[in-house]
Image (cartoon, grey):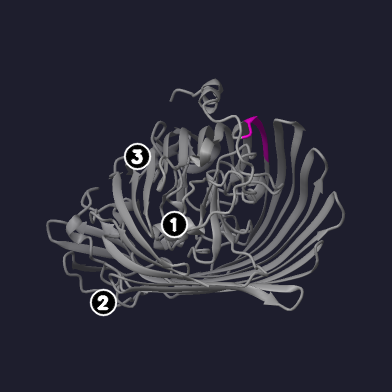
Amino acid sequence: MARLPLAVIAALASLGPAHAETELAPVEVTAGRDVASLGLDQASSSGSRTGVTARELPASIESVDSLTVQERGDYTIMDAITRAAGVSGVGSGGNGAMSFSTRGFTGTNSVGLAEDGMRLSTGSGTQNYPNDSWGYERIDVLRGPASVVYGSGTVGATINAVRKAPSRNASAEALFGIGSDGTGRIGLGGSGTLGEIASFRVDAYAHTTDGQRDLGNASGSKLMTTLRLQPNSDLRFELLADYSKQKPERYWGTPNDKGRIVSSLRDENYNVSDAIISYEDKRLRGRVEWQANDWLSLRDEVYYFEANRHWKNVEQYSLNAAAGTVDRSDYLEIRHNMDQTGNRLEAGIRSDRHRGVVGWEVAQVNFRHSNNSPYGGTSTVSAADPAHGTWSSPDPTLAKFDTRSTLQAFYAEDAWQFADKWLLLAGIRHDVADVSRHELVSGSDFAKTLHGNAWRLGLTYRLNPATSLYAQASAGHDPVTSIITMNLSNSKFTLTKGRQVETGVKQSLGNGRGEWTAALFRIDKDDIITRDPANPALSVQGGSQHSQGIELSAALTPWKNWRVEGNYAVLRARYDELLEAGGVDRAGKRPTDVPEQVANLWLHRLIGPVQASLGGRYVGKRYADNANSVTLPGYAVADAALAWKYDSQTTLRLIGRNLTDKVYATTSYGSQQFVLGQGRSVELVAELKF
């Protein structure tokens, strides 16, 4: 791919105004907003712990705020963040349905997930929290290696959900929705005061659906609470307590016919009638922030996270098109019981030219994995009208292993404003993971220590008050498998290494016409698992891959009462060195589940108290295997919303999703099954504010 020189970006940036307002006046919201923005002037807590704004940050970051989520009807974080540039979802029942692909890297070991900057460790490749978007002020995606801020497993990107904070201004909001396929949802939230120094925030949410497929019923609920104590302006305490229970759709994909989507099987589900997918999360956090003096602040956060997960399903399906049957196998039951206790201590140091932080993180993670390996059991059912039957396996479900992991990190960042228009952001981090595994049935116990170093160096030039140019180099690391659940064969491997170079522009247009950004990047990743050329039966480190691309994002107000939001990403991702079983060379092939084009577009028209919105998503073709022999076709999906602001407190919103009822695959589950996207649906939602 041809490289876009910095001079071209600078020339584009010079088209902007020489001046921009540093603070926007309050906007009276009608059915929607009347100013388009990418949030370039908000503090980028997800991109750096130094407090720089998104405009100052020499990296690509994008935010989806709560109002945008409501406008689009994106009530899950998966739906909301896959509207961001270059992000596509690859979630399935096996990875907690919270797995993503971006910048050529895919999955829970390359795209991290956090809440308020804090991550729950990934066990056995599963991420499932946070899931619902209710209760969050915004959802950010920091693209490229983010190990300096978030640690290992973030070479592709990190998604961070930022909670709504307590306020001493009393407020309340509610959401009630009802839709096709028996869908219903309710959200409640509010803030207020408790005495002279205390304030609170409570958010509750629940949803249910019968689903579009057989056995498609799903439900979930959560409670998020925050209590803030602020004795004076220099000292603040917070206590957060959350609970979540999810029972997602028990669906593992639809078998394909030699790599072809079989549209007639779209509504079928080949699982058993008593299948189970259940996720339960409990979270307790305490925070304290103290402004010791003009130049020093201290912050400490202690937490306890607990996750309990249960799967009991038939997961593998093979279509016999000639016979009209589906062969089922892998009668699988798995349980995860995980708890994580940790602390993060941080000091912020400020001067006229510097905004710096130094910190230490430590976490203790206990994980128990139970399963019924080797997952015996088989059956054959009709492809068109399956008799689901019940789950039965000759293999008992037993606790197979325990792990105990101690994770530590030391980090430092500094934003140095060394001249009026120049900012240098530098960061470094060292991670240490001590993992011990105790085999409860068979095999050998072992202990392993992993070390990872990460750094970034970025330069931002403020061409004028509205326009910033930036360039950065960064390095991070990913595990070859989930760190806290590595097995004996994986314990001989070290962390993979990722390196990125990126340059771009961020600009506000004059007269409130909007904002736009562009980024050009290349990421190289080394030490991925490959096969020994001398003995292809042995797995070794030494493989490599790369991706390079361009991302464009814009939020524009071209005419009064019109607003346009869109983004486009194009990349080229390839393996540079990869041998698979039998010594088969995959160099030059594209990694699985990686689209090379992703685009999103929303058009909003405000007519008095009514806002009409039309949106479109495009995801290019992907492959289900490293041989690139099984293709997931590209797809385009159209959505729409019609909002009526009845009065200052009430908005009614009609939402239509997948208007053309497109049959498409979001990801693969092995090479024989495609996870199909949802068909056409309609929902009516009432939004109330008090």
Q: Earlier in the sequence, mark 1 or mark 2?
A: 1
Instruction: Assess disc 3: are there few (<14), some (14-19) or many (≥20) residues with their C-alpha within 10 Å of its C-alpha.
Output: some
Q: Which residue is mark 3?
A: 627
- From the image, tell me which residue sits under label 1: 32
Q: Which residues are magenta?
A: 455-465
Residue at the image point whose x is 75% and y is 41% from the top: 414
Mark-to-mark CA distance, 1 and 3: 47 Å
Alpha carbons under labels 3 and 2: distance apart: 35 Å
Residue 203 located left or right of residue 684: right
Give the x, y percent position of residue 523. 53, 35
Mark 3 and mark 1 in contact (Cβ < 8 Å)?
A: no
- Kindly identify which residue carries mark 2: 389
Residue ID at (40%, 43%): 594
Drawn side of residue 352 relative to residue 241, left or right: right
Residue closest to the eye, 483 or 396: 483
The answer to whether one can see residue 225 in this image is no
